[in-house]
Amino acid sequence: MAGIRMENKIYEVGMYCRLSKDDGTDNESASIATQKSILTDYVKKQGWHLAKTYVDDGYSGTNFQRPSFQNMIKDIESGLINCVITKDLSRLGRNYLDCGLYLEVFFPEHNVRYIAVNDGVDTLNKSAMDITPFRNILNEMYSADVSVKIKSAYRARFQQGKFMGTTAPYGYVKDPADHNHLLIDDKVAHVVREIFDLALAGNGIAKIRKHINKQHILRPAAYAAEQGATGYERYFEENEENRYIWSENSVRGILRSPIYAGNLAGYKRIAANMKSKKRPSKLPEEWEVIPDTHEGIVTQEEFDTVQQLITSRRLPENKGGFENIFAGVIKCADCGYAMRAMSANRRKRPDIIDCVQYSCNNYGRYGNIMCTAHSIEARDLFNAVLTDINRFADMAVNDEKAVRAIEKRLTETDQSKAKALEKEQRKLNKRLAELDRLFSSLYEDKVMERITERNFEMMSGKYQKEQLEIEARLKEVTETLSDSYEKTQGVRDFLSLIRNYQGIKELDATIINALIDKILVSEREKLTDGMVRQEIKIYYKFIGFVGELHITPTKRWTALKPKNCTVCGVEYVPRSGISKYCPACAKKIQREKSNESKRRSRERNRQACIELSAKNDRLILNSRREESYDRATRMIRSRYFVMLRKVRLIVTHGSSLRISRNSSDRS
């Protein structure tokens, strides 16, 4: 292989060129053609062999997931190239962490030499590599600066009400005269209008979706693809019918978007920084909105009304007037699902709370294959929570000894653990200081040539590994101690808060949400003595779970007020809202009704027997009549045939006599 030997080695060179969109095309030195020219001349001068050229045109240096760069990495791993050359260090990348990983770990492990021609970076030149990390940091700072400038420019245009999206939203098209302005698309605007009309009529998203699907209308992605937008066809390759199947997210996106009220909405998803590719979604209330930027398909009042209908996912009161103050707080202890308030209309009670019970939503939706009912009466839950809040409030105000006891119980374990962690923390900090001194001494020994380069790298690697492990453990210990201190302070905050609720007699959603994080309800448990017990766990703000409550579930009839028996006038506790008699009279009346019922039943049976007997008699009589009729018919028939035979004989005999008489007369 021809070429000039450098350090007795001939290199198979991979030439890498990159140009970001942010770098622009006006600067000739940053163009792909210029990079290729500079690198080709350099390779020729060195006499090396150019194995392959890799080009990433239009890719940011902050991201290393570039097609040609990844192909180059694969060629390095397969041994096709052993030298990588770029025009400068920024062409390799602008993320100093990833650049350092490739320069200091990946390339040396694969015996690959890296050269940045204009920056004078060469991995064989150790002294030049000492300053390379600072170059990477400067390159990243440049990217960060460019990112800030671009974001500022985009924000300025957004504040001016200019639409910056690549494709116009469903129901709109870009203005041919100004691509940053939106015009209503008359072809599909009526679909958007219909979706909002259905929502204003009180229909949910699922019903709206079904209604639109029945009309066989192209979904937004399919319509965009039909208008020439790219990137959507992959959704319909396997099933053409998918073009007409709307999803609930499509309907929800239209109903939620301020675009359709004539407002420009942006910054719905923002990355944490230029390195992060994760863009967490924001709530619609957190979007930035510029009003009156284009013509709306619906009015602002209609849009606001729809938003209220969508966001009011639960009603403060159900149809029976019950206010669900535990909504969002009460959970099933076994499956973690929310428990729903169930109103049974068949229970006629004077107070609405006595007509409601809570039940596991998972059980209500899927049955006992997923969970059990975990039913608890709303009255029982209300009383248990009210009693527990009053207990803690009285304790916080009147019983300092009990307060100290509960503080000790909640923080005793944490305090003993905290002492051990504080001791470990001091030990770790001391070891970190020792390692810093060792690093300083080791570097001094290297500079003074008391130790070799090999020994320096070996010892520094060992110390660095230990340092990283200590720092990780120290961070963990510090966070644990912080949590312990917060819990100790949380007990004081909770007791200070709950003092304000001493002596309350009624609960409302404000009190529940101020004091309680969640309430877990267990399934009812039947004890050996036949009693039924149910466990409730209340997790309070600041302190969490303190202790479970065990209640005896109230029988339904005990919630009713006493009333007087309509027969004897004695006061009694009714078992149902329609009860009229005391237990003694109820038994007597029930016995009388039972006897009367039995008497009527016997009478009905006797009457049925009489009717059945009469029916049988009629059947027998009819049967006998039919038999007599058959016999008479047979007798008549037999007599008829006998008489017919005689008549025939007589007729035959008479004819013969007449014939004989006629013969004698003629003679």
Image: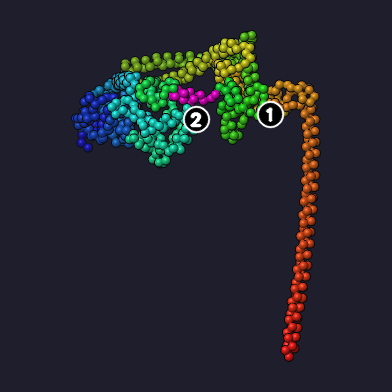
Image quarter for residue 236? top left
Residue at (24% x, 31% y) in the render: 8
The residue at the point 33 percent across, 35 percent down is 228
Q: From where the camera sits, is residue 519 visible?
A: no
Residue 349: x, y in percent? 67, 24
Residue 526 numbered tag: 1
Q: Quadrant of residue 507?
A: top right
Question: Quadrant of the rendered structure where residue 379 is?
Answer: top right
Query: What is the spatial separation of the Cα atoms under label 1 and label 2, in whole angstroms?
Result: 44 Å
65 above or below 421? below
Type of the residue with mark 1: Lys
Residue at 76 percent of width and 22 percent of height: 564
Question: Residue 203 bears which disc, if any?
Answer: 2
On screen, 492 above or below 18? above
Say which amino acid is labelled 2.
Asn
Q: Residue furthest front?
A: 665
- Badge 1 density bin: few <14, some 14–19, many ≥20, Cα 10 Å: few
Q: Earlier in the sequence, mark 1 or mark 2?
A: 2
Which residues fall within the magenta stretch? 302-315
Q: Give the main secondary structure of the magenta stretch.
A: helix
